[in-house]
Amino acid sequence: MEYTQLGRTGLRVGRIVLGTMNFGPHTDEADSHSIMDAALDAGVNFFDTANVYGWGENKGRTEEIIGSWFARGNGRRDKVVIATKVFGGMNADGEPWPNEDRLSALNIRRAVDASLRRLRTDHIDLYQFHHVDRRTPWDEIWQAMDVLVQQGKILYVGSSNHAGWHIAQANETARRRGSLGLVSEQCLYNLAERRAEMEVVPAARAYGLGVIPWSPLHGGLLGGVLRKEREGGGARSASGRSADALANSSIRNQIQAYEDVVDKHGLAPGEVALAWLLTRPGVTGPIVGPRTAEQLESALRAVELKLPEELLTSLDEIFPGPGPSPEAFAW
């Protein structure tokens, strides 16, 4: 495993981030524990989750699975940088009761204590805003975060799904308060979805945030979906977002071109997509969400994969980035 600093901090994390969203809904507790053991054995030390993972009536279940793994001891908790998120309401049905979601100081206080109980730990290494709260002023949010840092309940604060100007607004407010501010941004970013390069990634780099891409295979589209379809094994991959996208002939042709050029180089599509993200400026590491140990092994191979310049050029031709702003939308 290769390690890097998380943004401008002194925190060292692996370049592959273990996403846990499948733990509970798709992977049972025993298999989830096995995947976390395998990840730790491979040197993966950065695990990402959220308080709402588990979904529906099982919200919080994913944190509980991680907590039961920590409770098995042998230094597991001390070796892992654990990141979780706050924003969504925890009610299984209907609208949340007032102050039981978003980023008010009251909800933050309640949510962090609940996550600590589920995770069976005394602190969270990276506490992330799962979304932008347009109702709560940044001064209130940072006041709540500063209290949690002082109490030792959290160490660092990150964002997720924030625009570039949100990152600037958050960190300018933190600067005025003498706070460290955001140290990471978790955003949708992959070969097929490069809009983050317009403003989110430049803002993150300017303020010293590590970029943590989620959905690095774009819902399975970059994981060899057409090959699996031809071989009769693509039922799971070509579902949901993937199936909808492939119904568009231009996108289907683009994905076919991608699989063809990757095949020409004798490489696996999913591993190339991850390795490409590791070449991008500002990227700490992509989040991979394996359902099985085999999927984890494939993701780990991407760290050692050095993409030829010819292939990098071809990827830019197939999936051209938007370019920096304002040029991307002004002229």
Image (cartoon, rainbow, N blue to C red):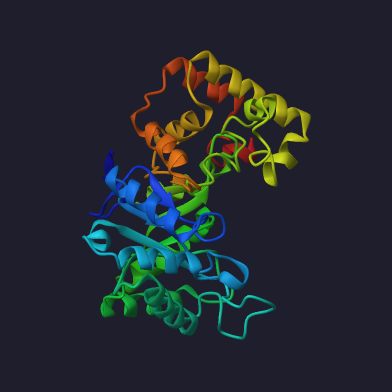
Residue drawn at 47 percent across, 40 percent down: 295
Which one is nearer the viewer's eye here, 328 or 237? Answer: 237
Query: Whole-percent x and y of residue 280?
Result: 42, 35
Residue 66 shows in this picture: yes
* Quadrant of the frame with the N terminus: top left
Residue drawn at 53 percent across, 13 percent down: 264
Residue 126 shows in this picture: no
In the current view of this chain or complex, which residue is farthest to the front?
30
Which one is nearer the viewer's eye here, 88 or 187? Answer: 88
* Quadrant of the frame with the C terminus: top right
Left or right of 65 on screen, residue 233: right
In the image, residue 86 sits, relative to residue 35, either above or below, namely: below
Which one is nearer the viewer's eye here, 166 or 22? Answer: 22
In the image, residue 84 sits, relative to residue 274, either above or below, namely: below
Query: Whole-percent x and y of residue 273?
Result: 50, 32
Query: Whole-percent x and y of residue 321?
Result: 57, 33
Q: How many marks?
A: 0
The quarter holding residue 179 reads bottom left
Which one is nearer the viewer's eye here, 61 or 128? Answer: 61
